[in-house]
Image: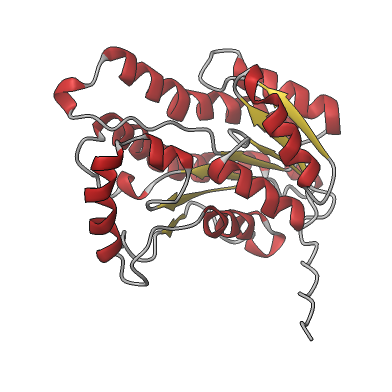
Amino acid sequence: MTTPAPPVPQTLASKVAVVSGSSHGIGAAIAQELSSRGASLVLNYPTPDLEDTAEQLGNSLAGSFASVCADISTADGPAKLIDAAVKAFGKIDILINSAGRIIVKPFEEQTLEDFTTLVNTNLRGMWLLTQAALPHLPKKEEGGGGRIVNMCSGVARQPMANQSTYCATKGAIDSLTKEWARELPPKYGCTVNSVAPGPIETPGMRGCMTAEEMAVVQPQMEMATPVAPRVGKPEEVAWAVAFLCEERSRWINGESLFVSGGLVID
C-alpha cells in the first residue's frame, strides 16, 4: 500500500506572488511551487500566442491566479504587469524577477540587437518591474515582510565562453541584488535576494545551442558537477526560491543562493 504524500505546509497562505516570465521553464516551476504553499499567483507571458499555455498552467495550480500578457523587455511591459496584478488581487507580497533570455555566440559574432535584447529583457526589465512593484509591497510601518527574489545565474561569478552579454547582464543582477538589499529594506521592510542556477533542463537551455553543440557541452558540465553527473531540474530551483519567500527566511537578505549541484562554488 502506497503511503500518501504529506500535505504541503501552507507557509505562503494569503500571499500574492508576481512571477515574470512564468509561462514555461523555471518561471512556471516557481509559480507551481509558490502556489503549492498557498500563494495566489500572477502569471506572466510576453506574447499573445502564449495565452493558452499560461492559462493551462494557471488551471493546474493549487490556488487562485491571474495571467497577464506583458513583454518585460519593453519600456511599458513591467508597469502593465504590476498594474494588472494590483487590479486582480489588490496587493503584492512577493516579486520574482524570472523573465530572461540567453544568447550563446562568440563575442565577435554578437550583434547590437543581441546586446539590446539581453539587456532589455534580463536587466532593464527587472529594474523597471521592481521599481513599479515597490509601492504595492507590504508597508514597513505595518510590519513589512515583502520579498524580492531575482533570478541570477552561476555565470555571474564564473563566466562561460560565448555568453559575454548574458554574463554581463547576470553580473549586473548580482550587483543590483546586493545594492537593493542595503537600500530597500530600511524603506520598505522587505528582503532582497537572488537565486543563481547552474545549467537547468529547460527548453531555453536546449534552444540556446545546436544539438551538436549541446552533445559536446552537456557531458562536460555534468562531469564537472560534484553532487551528480546531471543538469538541474526546474523544480529544484523553484524550491530555493520558495524558501527565500517564506516568513522563516526573514533574516536572509542580500544573498545569492547557488543551485548547481556544486558546479558553481563561490
Q: Residue at x 76, y 29 (%)?
A: 85
| Image position, residue 146 (x, y; %) | 69, 46
- Vertical relation: 28 (above or below) 107: below
Q: How far across and down, in percent of the image, does residue 255 sit?
A: 47, 55
Residue 176 spot, x, y in % from top left: 43, 37
x 58%, y 33%: residue = 21
Q: Which residue is farthest left?
A: 108
Left/right placement of residue 36 relative to residue 149 reads right
Q: Is residue 44 visible?
A: yes
Closer to the camera in the image, 134 or 72: 72
Residue at 54 percent of width and 13 percent of height: 75
Q: Is residue 80 above or below residue 186?
A: above
Coloration of the structure image: secondary structure
Of the 4 image quadrants, the one containing the C terminus is bottom left
Instruction: Give the quadrant of the N terminus.
Output: bottom right
Query: In the orientation shown, which residue stands out farthest toward the bottom?
Result: 1
Residue 1, placed above or below residue 9: below
The residue that appears at 83% across and 24% down in the rendered structure is 87
> In the visual, does 249 lie left or right of 182?
right
> Residue 138 at what x, y percent from top left?
76, 41
Q: Quadrant of residue 222?
A: bottom left
Instruction: Tell me if residue 90 can be seen.
Output: no
**How many marks on residues?**
0
Query: In the picture provided, is 136 more to the left or to the right than 104?
Result: right
